[in-house]
Structures are given as C-alpha cells and as structure tokens.
Amino acid sequence: MLILGLVVFIVLASYVISLYVLFKRSPLLKQAPPPSRAPLISVIVPARNEERNLKVTLAALLGQDYPNFEVIAIDDNSTDATPILLAQAAARDPRLRIVQGETLAEGWTGKNFAVFQGAQVARGDWLLFVDADVSLAPGALSAAYQGARKHKAALFSLWPSHDLHGFWERAVQSVILAMHYFAEMFQRIRRPWNLTAGPANGQFILISRRAYDEVGGHRAVRDSVLEDYELSYRLRQQGHNTITLNGARLAQVRMYASLGEIWQGWSKNTFLGMRNGPLETFGATAVVALVCCGPLALSLWAVLELSLDPSATAVMGLGLAAVSWLLLAAAGRLLRPLINLPLGYLVSFPLGGLVLIGILLNSAYRHTLGNGVRWKGRRYGAAAQRPVEP
C-alpha cells in the first residue's frame, strides 16, 4: 500500500506541475481597448434547442464594444422556443441575422453543418465561432482580435470560466474539467502542438477568413465531433500560428445543468478524444482514479493501519495522504480562475472521479460496441463519427 501511496504522490505532483506550466504558457487574456482599425468580424452562433441560454448569449454578443461586427445565428431545426427568441432579438437589432438551418446533410455532425451554413453567408474578414451557451464580457471581441494580432495567429481560441450550480455540477463537472486541463497538457506536447499553442476550444474560436477557407473550413472536418481539434490541427500542419489562452475574465459558460446532461454530453466525445482508443482510455481511467480517489484511499488506509498497528509505515502513509490532499488543494487553486469551486468540494473529488470513470467506460462502449450516444435528438456513433437522425 505504501507503494501505491508513492504512485499517488507522483501522479498528483505531476498533475500540479502540469497545470502550473499550462497556465504559465496560456495566461489570462486581459481586457483591451477597441482597435482603431477594425475589420468586419462575423460572429457565428449555432443554436439547437437553446432557449435556456439564448437571451443572455445574444445580449452579451450584441453588447460588444468592438466597432465593426455582425452576428449570424443559425437555428438548427430547433423544437423549442429558440426560433421565437431569435426572431425577437433580430427585430430589435439589425446586426443580428438569422439563418434557418437546412435538414442535416449526410456525413456531417449537427454543429459542423450549422456553422458551415453560417460561414457561407458571413461577410467578415474574421470569423468568430461561439457556442450558444457562452456569455461574453463587453470587451471580449476586442481583446480576442487584439490578441490574435499580437500573436500573429490565424486562429485565436479561449477557455471560458465555468458557471457551476448545484451539487452535481460542482461535484462532477468540476472534476471532469479539472482532468480535461490535465489532458490538455498532454495534447500540447504532441506534434504539431507545443507548450504555448494547443488545440482550439470550440466554444470560442476566432479565425482569419483567409486561413479558414485555405484549410477547407468546416467542410474539411464535417464528420468530426472534435472539430475544434481537427480544424486547429490542419492549420498548424499548413504552417499557420494558432493560440489558445485562458479567457476566464472575458467569457463564461454553463455547459450542462444536470447529471444526465453531464453524462450524455461528455459520453459523446471523451472516447473520440482518445487517439489510441481503448489503451488510452485505460490509461485515462487509471490517472483519474489516482488523482481523484487516491487521497481518500490513502487516508482510509492510514487511519485503519494506525488503529490496528501504529507503525512507522502507517505514519508514513498518513503523511503521504496529507501531502496528497495538499497537492489536490494546490491544483484547485491553480484552476480557480476557470473553475471557481469552493475548497470544501475537494472532498467530493472521489465521487466525481468515479462518475468520470463511468463516463469514460460508457463512452468507449457506446462508440465501439454500442449504438452511439444520443445528444439533442441525434445519435452520434464513432464508426462514422457523425450523427444519425432518429
């Protein structure tokens, strides 16, 4: 058991170091004044059954201080009040244009087909793809454009901060996100990435129209659930600079509002992000168990050993358990700008870790042996990596 304790300590220490390096290389993007020379930016928002988010999202987009932009919202065959909300917003502000999405074409994912239609009518020199559940600060567009110019980036992407409500979002979604940023570090050390430039985040992608067209746009990644990774990967392969930074001060998102949504949403794409399939899934499961459940397991073992036989080994185990909890707290501190989680929720990490392991295994099963994952009325399967209409 002492060996397991050392393994937990090493993995957690590596986790904290990785987060530190990641956020050092991808610092918080700060506010910036609107540029004096402002090319037209087309903001493209895919919306499928987004009545919960649209009012806040559209108000934030239309309230940007950037002096020259248009907003294009694609109603992706919604069955809720999304079309009504879009029409009301467009009547109030002529900068908002509504595109009625066509029936999903064969070989496309729903989101890719929606934003592709938006890009077809966009007039901007730059395109901003932003999800319908993302709320932007008034200076986000100006700061992103200035950041892209500063870094000479053809693609400029941001991580938003996460708005977590209720027990399950704080206990489970926070753990998934915490492990996601750990995985991000491994993605960055894979060619053609580096420690500064990693995969794009599809929730917020600002891209030069010229570079977008050069790599084939979303048509080139039409069947990919991880289109953000694929699009930025293609740009890097062709020599374009891509940058992904911490946008916690400029963008906020609430991805899922229930445990069911968390389970389905992450089951849709976690396995597809594992390039080595089952082998990488097994490794990810082991890491999640060590990081999230290791400190509690060590604590219980140490307390049991001390109660039965207060030996030096038991004392060492208790020390390793204490250090492991401190390392987990340090990780929480590093993640705080993106995941503002109360410190007390660290004790729920084992529960969140177990749920994440279940999601990893469920995603692997459904994308290999099962019949895919249902999301917003569509079924996604790994064999074709595209949705199938019910």
Image: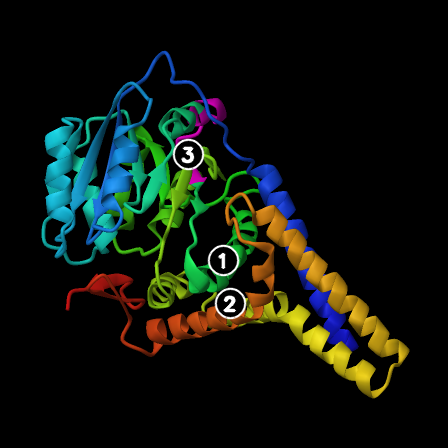
Eye-nearest disc, 1 or 3 = 1
Picture residue at 13% right of the left edge, 51% below the top: 81
What are the residue bounds of the magenta stretch? 147-158
Packing grade of label 3 (10 A; few <14, some 14-19, many >=20) is many
Badges 1 and 2: C-beta atoms under 8 Å apart?
A: yes
Q: Quadrant of residue 257?
A: bottom left
Packing grade of label 1 (10 A; few <14, some 14-19, many >=20) is many
Q: Earlier in the sequence, mark 2 or mark 3?
A: 3
Packing grade of label 2 (10 A; few <14, some 14-19, many >=20) is many
Amino acid, disc 3:
Phe
The number of numbered badges drawn on the structure is: 3
Q: Which residue is mark 2?
A: 352
The one nearer the camera, 219 or 205, is 205
- Element at badge 2? helix
Residue 128 screen position, x and y as percent: 31, 34
Residue 139 screen position, x and y as percent: 39, 26
Picture residue at 46% right of the left edge, 37% below the top: 247
Residue 70's place in the image compared with 118, above or below, is above
Q: Which residue is mark 1?
A: 174
Amino acid, disc 1:
Ser
Residue 118 screen position, x and y as percent: 19, 39
The one nearer the camera, 191 or 52, is 52
Q: Is residue 86 magenta?
A: no
